[in-house]
Amino acid sequence: MTSSADFPERYGPWALVTGASDGIGRAIARELAARGLHLVLVARRREALEAVAQELGSGFGIQTRVVAADLSSPAERRRLELVVGGTPVGLVVAAAGFGTSGPFLEADPEAESGMLEVNCAAVLELCLHFAPRLQRRGGGGIILLSSLLAFQGVPGAAHYAATKAWVQTLAEGLRPEFRRHGIDLLCAAPGPVRSGFGARARMTLGFAAEADDVARDVVQALERRRFLVRPAMLSWLLEASLKPLPRFARTRILAKIMDGMTRRPPEAATVGPATRI
Ligand SMILES: NC(=O)c1ccc[n+]([C@@H]2O[C@H](COP(=O)([O-])OP(=O)(O)OC[C@H]3O[C@@H](n4cnc5c(N)ncnc54)[C@H](OP(=O)(O)O)[C@@H]3O)[C@@H](O)[C@H]2O)c1
């Protein structure tokens, strides 16, 4: 267990947090700032990142750097690596990500390949870039974001669930190797969380955990050197109810849940004469 006093020594002086402009990434950034880590904040929206930097810098007396980058672009990912090249990063949090939902036969190919780039390729490249650096400095940490949906196929969010299964499998495979080099790899698998995620994925999350509760549980789990965390009580409860079931039964249940979460109003109802501009 790492105490709060040891935290900056083990995971600092700097942490890099992707997806820091919103939701879970922003909340994790706050937890890290409260433990005295300086922060490189990464996402696309510069203004939102600067607001987070301003708040955490003045609130916790830490240094911040903002890198506005679209992680769906391989060139932007290279630029991020160059920009942070000289920064002594001891902890990487790969929280940038998004989901899509609805029938796969109606999917937008561009959105699906963008999701694969952000949820998988960017995560892989962050691990490839930073893990050897953490090994050379004698250790550190990496936090990846999986999902409750990662543990079975999910009709209505088939590709999103597959990207999170990819993250989960990668994390499980890397954990023992990283551990031998003092790198703590943690994989967080939340259930529904209130954040920007639902609107972007076009999912209605009826009940959802708070991003602050998720972030608190994730960072406390890192302090305890745990691997897989179901952050916030809701994630834990949902997992506990699905876990005893065989995979095909979980898929059937999640298909029904996704159907409710992704039901779109008929075209005519959403674009009536009054709403047409
Ligand atoms: N919310 C949930 O129910 C839930 C459940 C399980 C797992 N997760 C996972 O948790 C992670 C965080 O999600 P969240 O709930 O915090 O969602 P969120 O509030 O929508 O935040 C997503 C973050 O990712 C950034 N991002 C998205 N696309 C990006 C891109 N192309 N390049 C760079 N940054 C990008 C966004 O910033 P910009 O828009 O400024 O780029 C934002 O900071 C995701 O990996 C998600 O899959 C979420």
Image (tube, rainbow, N blue to C red):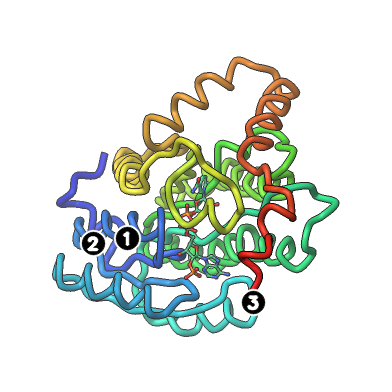
Whether 177 is drawn above or below 277: the answer is: above
Whether 88 is drawn above or below 127: the answer is: below
Q: How crowded is the residue under tag 3: few (<14 C-alpha within 10 Å), some, or many (20+)?
A: some
Q: How crowded is the residue under tag 1: few (<14 C-alpha within 10 Å), some, or many (20+)?
A: many
How far across and how far down the image is residue 197, in percent? 51, 54
Residue, x 58% and y 22% (percent of image)? Answer: 242
Q: Which mark is residue 57?
A: none
The mark total stands at: 3
Circle 1 residue = 29
Going by the numbered disc 2, the residue's amino acid type is: Ala
Residue toward you, 113 or 196:
196
How far across and how far down the image is residue 2, in percent? 24, 44
Q: Secondary structure at mark 2?
A: helix
Circle 2 residue = 33
Q: Secondary structure at mark 1?
A: helix
Residue toward you, 207 or 240:
207
Going by the numbered disc 1, the residue's amino acid type is: Ala
The tag earlier along the polypeptide, 1 or 3, is 1
Q: How crowded is the residue under tag 2: few (<14 C-alpha within 10 Å), some, or many (20+)?
A: many
Give the Cα separation between the discs numbered 1 and 3: 23 Å
Q: Are marks 1 and 2 in contact (CB under 8 Å)?
A: yes
The tag earlier along the polypeptide, 3 or 2, is 2
Circle 3 residue = 73
Q: Quadrant of residue 217?
A: top left
Residue, x 66% and y 70% (percent of image)? Answer: 276
Q: Are marks 1 and 3 in contact (CB under 8 Å)?
A: no
Lateral position of residue 202 relative to residue 82, left or right = right
Q: Secondary structure at mark 3?
A: loop
